[in-house]
Image: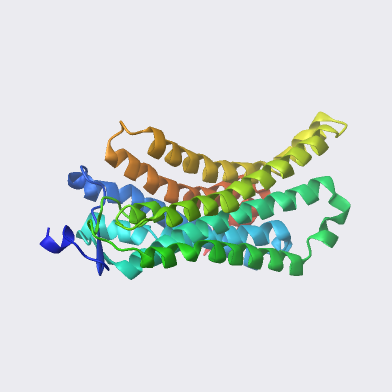
Amino acid sequence: MSHSNVTDFTNPSTIILLGIPGLEADYVWMSIPFCAMYAVVLLGNFIILFIVKIEASLHEPMYYFLCMLAITDLVLSTATLPKMLSIFLFSSREISFSACLTQLFFIHCFAVMESGIFMAMAFDRYVAICHPLRHSAILTNPLVAKIGLAVALRGIMLVLPIPLLLRRWLYCRTNILPYTHCEHMDVVKLACSDTRVSSYYGLFVLLCGIGLDMFFIAISYFQILRAIFRLPTKEARLKTLGTCSSHVCAILAFYIPNFFSSFTQRFGQNLPHYFHVLIGDVYLQLPPMLNPIIYGVRSKQIRDRLLRLFACVSRI
């Protein structure tokens, strides 16, 4: 490693991503499951977008939100996986400082957006179950578009100060990151300035973004469960609950890996470093891969349209 990587510098031109230290010998083998995950992300989410576009019966709020989720997943996965695979397969560890800040902006911005979309989908389920006769009147297409725009603007406005703050700090320690991608707190640790503003603002984003979303999702499902348990028959309760199953599974696939990753970072000091890096990588790739599978399997409308599409292709 060159001397400039470990001596004083105030504005690093490049960041060195080491990948997963300790597992270098297994990079080629590790690239196989990650390539497979990326293929599923691309294929699954593009299929969701295609089916919703061509199927007129799916032109309703729930599936518009699903399209927003698919686009978010595509961007979130593409922001990290190509660089990760280039490290594994081609030892391409350098990334410019500007590209590093751009990458972490997309990671955090679209993670906040995804959380906001889940909150919007919870609102859709709340209206559909608690106010079914007013659903189409409340969730009109213009309102759905405004919600999507608000979710996107909130993510951009909350996360944009993060890379702007990072550009202000002096970096005099090292430009080496023992990870496969750039994230906010990892870059903050490279600075030798007083970075408490960045740390506090990162916590603010977490609380005002994902924290608030989880609060409103919990309120929505509390009201949904109250309405379900008031239904007269068990069959009606199960049928109504089944309409929420895809959304609940997707929420769990997003938030549980997030919590597990945060938990291991804070309380797993005795775990090997490569375990932390792997958990962080899986956390970013698992929801984009699982979401199209969950909705493809659990949503009857999408499943039926997908089967018809495969039947048409097989006859060609």
Nearer the observer, 199 or 99: 199
Nearer the observer, 301 or 161: 161
Instruction: Evaluate whether residue 314 shows in this view.
Output: no
Residue at 64% over, 68% down: 149
Nearer the observer, 304 or 135: 135
Q: Find the residue positioned furthest to the front.
A: 194
Instruction: Evaluate whether residue 210 shows in this view.
Output: yes
Residue at 75% over, 66% down: 143
Residue at 43% over, 67% down: 164
121 horizontally vs 137: left or right = left
Residue 294 appears at what percent x and percent y? 57, 46
295 horizontally vs 277: left or right = right
Colour treatment of the image = rainbow
Total count of labels: 0
267 horizontally vs 315: left or right = left
Residue 119 appears at what percent x and percent y? 66, 51
Residue 20 appears at what percent x and percent y? 26, 47
Q: Is residue 236 above or below residue 12?
A: above
The answer to which quarter of the image holds residue 235 is top right
User: What is the quadrant of the N terminus in the image?
Assistant: bottom left
Residue 145 appears at what percent x and percent y? 69, 68
Q: Is residue 55 above or below residue 213?
A: below
Residue at 60% over, 61% down: 67
The answer to which quarter of the image holds residue 2 is bottom left
Nearer the observer, 14 or 54: 14
